[in-house]
Image: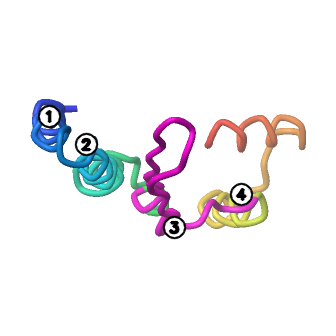
């Protein structure tokens, strides 16, 4: 959040022109990319860095909505990644594994 003052200043500068909507869109894009998730998300499997999905709403109406560059992984994809990095048969039960997978382990 070190850029918060820049985001607020950009919003203030454009507030009377377009209600500040474009500055909010720009700020959300920045948070979804280099100013946020793209540089701060865990890199263990390299899929979270592209998971930012910025959206902006105003009075309940969607002004901007961009899907993430990396789709949300399905349960099968997550299991495949887990198996690739943990090939040794597990000592955990299926229930315990589901709990671990749900927590991102």
Quadrant assignment, res 72: bottom right
Q: Residues within 10 Å of mark 2 (few under 14, many from 20)?
A: some
Q: What is the distance, in whole Å, between disc 3 and disc 4 at their CAs?
A: 28 Å
Q: Main secondary structure of the magenta part?
A: loop
* Residue contact between numbered discs 2 and 1, judged by CB atoms under 8 Å: yes
Q: Where is mark 1, residue-wise?
A: 12
* Residue bounds of the magenta highlight: 49-74
Residue 44 location, x and y as percent?
45, 54
Position of 17 relative to 69 (above/below): above
Q: Is residue 65 magenta?
A: yes
Q: Is residue 26 left or right of residue 6?
A: right
Q: What is the distance, in whole Å, between disc 4 and disc 2 at their CAs?
A: 53 Å
Q: Is residue 45 magenta?
A: no
Q: Where is mark 3, residue-wise?
A: 70
* Residue contact between numbered discs 3 and 2, judged by CB atoms under 8 Å: no
| SS for callout 1 | helix
* Residue contact between numbered discs 4 and 1, judged by CB atoms under 8 Å: no
Q: Nearer the viewer, mark 1 or mark 3?
A: 1
């Amino acid at each position: 959040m070190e850029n918060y003052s820049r985001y607020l200043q950009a919003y203030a500068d454009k507030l009377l022109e377009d209600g500040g909507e474009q500055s909010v869109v720009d700020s959300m894009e920045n948070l979804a990319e280099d100013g946020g998730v793209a540089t701060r998300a865990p890199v263990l499997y390299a899929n979270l860095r592209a998971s930012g999905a910025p959206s902006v709403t105003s009075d309940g109406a969607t002004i901007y909505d961009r899907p993430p560059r990396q789709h949300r992984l399905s349960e099968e994809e997550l299991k495949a990644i887990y198996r690739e990095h943990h090939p040794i048969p597990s000592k955990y039960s299926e229930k315990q594994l589901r709990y671990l997978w749900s927590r991102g382990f």
